[in-house]
Image (cartoon, rainbow, N blue to C red):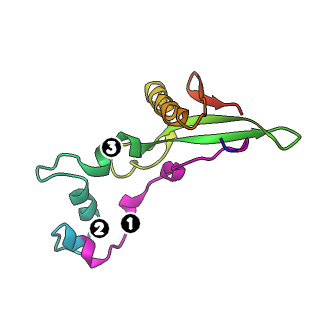
Amino acid sequence: MYDGRPIFYSLGNFIDQREYTTQFPPDMFDRYDIDDYTKPSKVFDARWTDEDGNPGGDLVDRHWWRSVIPVCTFGADGELDEVELHPISLQQDAGRPHRGTPIRATEDTAAEILATLSDLSAEFGTEIEIDGDRGIIRP
């Protein structure tokens, strides 16, 4: 919160459909030593797995695949009354057709997301009240 107004950082992870990219510049294929320039999916396979095919990179960083949808409520005077934070998952473990599509986080994942966000926000003086599967910020 700054001057009674919310500031949201890194909500750009709200949706992630990079795996449907249809073209990459040749240097992306070169970086991963891929000869077939017609299959961008090969870039993601190489980028997100190690030499043995095990998941790696962004694919294993759970924070990359989690976010919140904030809902701000303002009073008649235009002042912020509260912010509700609704945790979402971008389906990290789903296959290519669904991975990156936001869904409401499960109860355990929602609790982890809100706890992490609460810890990160505390150093800025913002308190997040956790109420079930949502977070609440009151200015």
What secondary structure is found at the residue carrying circle 2? helix
Residue 133 spot, x, y in % from top left: 55, 26
What secondary structure is found at the residue carrying circle 3? loop
- As shown in the figure, which amino acid type bears the numbered disc 3? Asp
Q: Name the residue carrying label 3.
A: 61
- As shown in the figure, which amino acid type bears the numbered disc 1? Thr
Q: Residue at x 26, y 71 (%)?
A: 28
What secondary structure is found at the residue carrying circle 1? loop
Mark 2 to mark 1: distance in Å? 7 Å
Side of 73 where 44 appears, left or right: left
Foreground mark, 3 or 2?
A: 3
C-beta proximity under 8 Å, tags 3 and 2? no
Towards the viewer: 65 or 45: 65
* Label 2 environment density (alpha carbons within 10 Å; few <14, some 14–19, many ≥20): some
77 over 34 or under it: above or below = above
Mark 1 to mark 3: distance in Å? 21 Å
Region rendered in magenta: 3-28
- Does the magenta run of residues contain 12? yes
50 over 81 or under it: above or below = below
Residue 84 spot, x, y in % from top left: 65, 34
Residue 79 spot, x, y in % from top left: 81, 41
C-beta proximity under 8 Å, tags 2 and 1? yes
Residue 72 spot, x, y in % from top left: 71, 41
Q: Name the residue carrying label 2.
A: 40
Q: Residue at x 84, y 38 (%)?
A: 75
Outermost residue, right side: 76
Q: Quadrant of the C terminus?
A: top right
Q: Name the residue carrying label 1.
A: 21
Q: Quadrant of the N terminus?
A: top right
Q: Quadrant of residue 18?
A: bottom left
Towards the viewer: 96 or 53: 53
- As shown in the figure, which amino acid type bears the numbered disc 2? Pro
